[in-house]
Amino acid sequence: MFKFSIRRSLVMVLAVGLFAASTLLTSANHSWGSYHWARSSNPINLILFDNVTSAWDQYLAEASADWSSSQVLNTSIAPGSANPKTCKAVSGAIQVCNARYGNNGWLGIASIWASGNHITQATVKLNDTYFNTARYNTPSWRRFVTCQEVGHTFGLDHQDENFTNLNLGSCMDYTNDPSGTAGTNGTANNEHPNSHDYQQLSSIYSHTDGAAAAAPTSEPPPAMNDIDIDGPGQWGRLVRSSENGLVELYELDFGNGHKVITIVTWTLESRRR
């Protein structure tokens, strides 16, 4: 009877452990659907066009260096020529812009243009209307949001969208306190990628595509490249919203596999639920 109880307890402990591990592995997957850049070999080389002011240059350089530590991608920064207000996308590259986009509630947005599962171009917008305020005008907030929005353009989603739990030490984890110094979300900072972000990138880019795969399956409509990803009227259909409404995913479908997908990060003051 005693031996049976021990054996049954061990089985129960093992089962619980396996379930917890399975849950952890499942929740740790944070790819953005199956979207990725097509390439014939790894690492893929991606250009980040710099359309940001000097206040942001340091953080863009850090994000580029951080993400280039991945084994499957290299990023380089080149001077941009876009109007930061519109931040018009450029085929085969990532436009990074900052401007005073207005009191519209969003802190940062990342958008990808997709043909099927392949990303063909991307943009990042950082809203100085809020980053010039005391709450967000800090190195930790600027570093956190830049790292995260650029990370989205590679096909990464968030590791976690709870703003009040402990920091995971990843810029792909939402938080009220990216520096970790206030102690409200633990002591880890969320200003850089962590090992799981790099593992997820390796998983996303574990395969390679033929050279022809980079070409769109059909010619995208001209309107797809003329939109200004500035507000809900241009974002399309709401696909997903976090529990508190501070993170939302929108999709604008142009047909024949052509889509523009946008992840919106709302300010903490925009909490709607």
Image: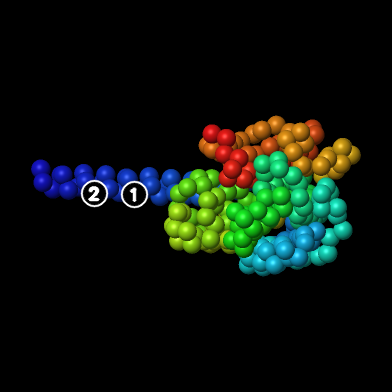
**Residue, far front:** 134
Does residue 68 lie above or below 109 as drawn? Answer: below
Return the residue nearer the eye: 91 or 71.
91
Percent position of residue 75, x then y: 72, 64
Mark 1–mark 2 Cα distance, whole angstroms, equals: 10 Å
Q: Residue furthest right?
A: 222
Seen at 17% across and 48% down, the residue is: 6
Where in the figure is residue 271, as x and y percent of width and height?
Answer: 57, 39
Q: Which residue is mark 1?
A: 17
Name the N-terminal-most of marks 1 and 2. 2
Pick the front one: 154 or 17? 154
Give the amino acid type for the residue marked by disc 2 in the picture. Answer: Leu
Q: Residue 227, percent across and down?
A: 83, 40
Does residue 232 show up?
yes
Q: Nearer the viewer, mark 1 or mark 2?
A: 1
Question: How was this image coloured?
Answer: rainbow
**Secondary structure state at the residue bearing disc 2:** helix
* Residue drawn at the location 40% of the way across and 50% of the way down: 21
Q: Nearer the viewer, residue 185 or 203?
A: 185
Q: Residue furthest left?
A: 1
Dot 2: few (<14), some (14–19), or many (≥20) neighbours within 10 Å? few
Which residue lies under the disc numbered 2?
A: 10
